[in-house]
Amino acid sequence: MDSVYHFPYSTPVVRILQITDPHLFALDNGQLIGVNTSQSFQAVLDAIQQTAFDYDFVLATGDLVQDHNREAYHRFAKMVKPLQKPIFWVEGNHDIQPQMRNALAMYAQMQMAKHILAGDKWQIILLNSQIHGLPKGELAQDQLAFLTAKLTAYPNRYSLVVLHHNILPTQSAWLDQHSLANADELATVLAPFQNVKAILHGHIHQEVDAQWHGYRVLATPSTCIQFKPNCDTFTLDAVPQGWRELNLMPDGSIETIVKRLDCVKFLPNFAAQGY
Ligand SMILES: Nc1ncnc2c1ncn2[C@@H]1O[C@@H]2COP(=O)(O)O[C@H]2[C@H]1O
Ligand SMILES: [Fe+2]
């Protein structure tokens, strides 16, 4: 299992930037339903750099690429370089190993650790919810064991759990079939612990801030196409691409906001039935 990343300073507030589901292609002109995902991702990165938010590190919550091509991971790593902060990542259903790990490992900025000790008060646990070849997710026994081990080892730290797949339904039947299949098992694993504050994910290409078994569940817009909530058949949304800022506070609370591009420059082909 990958090693722990221990931030070498004591910070009262842990500041995190989340980017998710960029769905990049190896080729410059790669498009997902009419959106050039490289261009929309670049617009998001440019907008992030124009904000005043000074984050400590970045969480990239999966589906970094769309075309299963290792060159697309190189594209990702090169594009995020100007952020100049450590980038942690989890696998999405579209990601592919070992190409992902091997490509990202070539960049010092890209972190392989799946456990972050941040400041004195928080830990962040990153889980792989991918089932090879399927859109839906599952936390395998080794991932649940890893989660249990970290929660047990650091009972005095507040915990943020990070994965790609959604726990709660989006009320869109087409998308909800691709949720985390063993959310009940996750709830059972978390139940004995008092220190879990939130679960952060991507995958559903929409913003969520909800409660599940007493945990805050946060989801974040994609940097490319957006899915419209509460639609039983595949439906795209016209809202702009976005990202999330999080402040993990010393009292265990989380202050967070989703930000979006201030333009609707990257509109998908609304006639598409899926991908
Ligand atoms: N029309 C559709 N019906 C059901 N699933 C779809 C459809 N189009 C795409 N998908 C899958 O749904 C997934 C949702 O987000 P992903 O980007 O992970 O990848 C998507 C596809 O694997
Ligand atoms: Fe996904």
Image: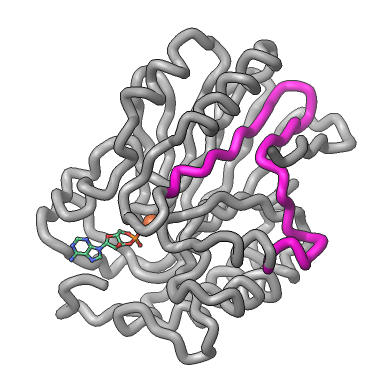
Q: Quadrant of ligand 2?
A: bottom left
Applied colour scheme: one colour
Q: Position of residue 60 (x, y in %)?
A: 57, 54
Residue 118 part of the magenta-drawn span: yes
Look at the picture and state if 253 lies above or below 94. above
* Farthest right residue in view: 8
* Farthest left residue in view: 232
> Would residue 10 appear left or right of 215 to someone viewing this image?
right
- Residue 256 visible in this rendered orientation of the protein: no
> Would residue 52 appear left or right of 270 to someone viewing this image?
right
* Farthest bottom residue in view: 29
Residue at 64% across, 18% down: 251
Residue 123 part of the magenta-drawn span: yes
Q: Which quadrant holds residue 267? A: bottom left
Q: Which quadrant holds residue 32? A: bottom left
Residue at 37% across, 58% down: 133
Q: Which quadrant holds residue 125? A: top right
Q: Position of residue 206 (x, y in %)?
A: 34, 54
Look at the picture and state if 139 lies above or below 275. above
Q: Position of residue 68 (x, y in %)?
A: 48, 72
- The span shown in magenta is 103-130
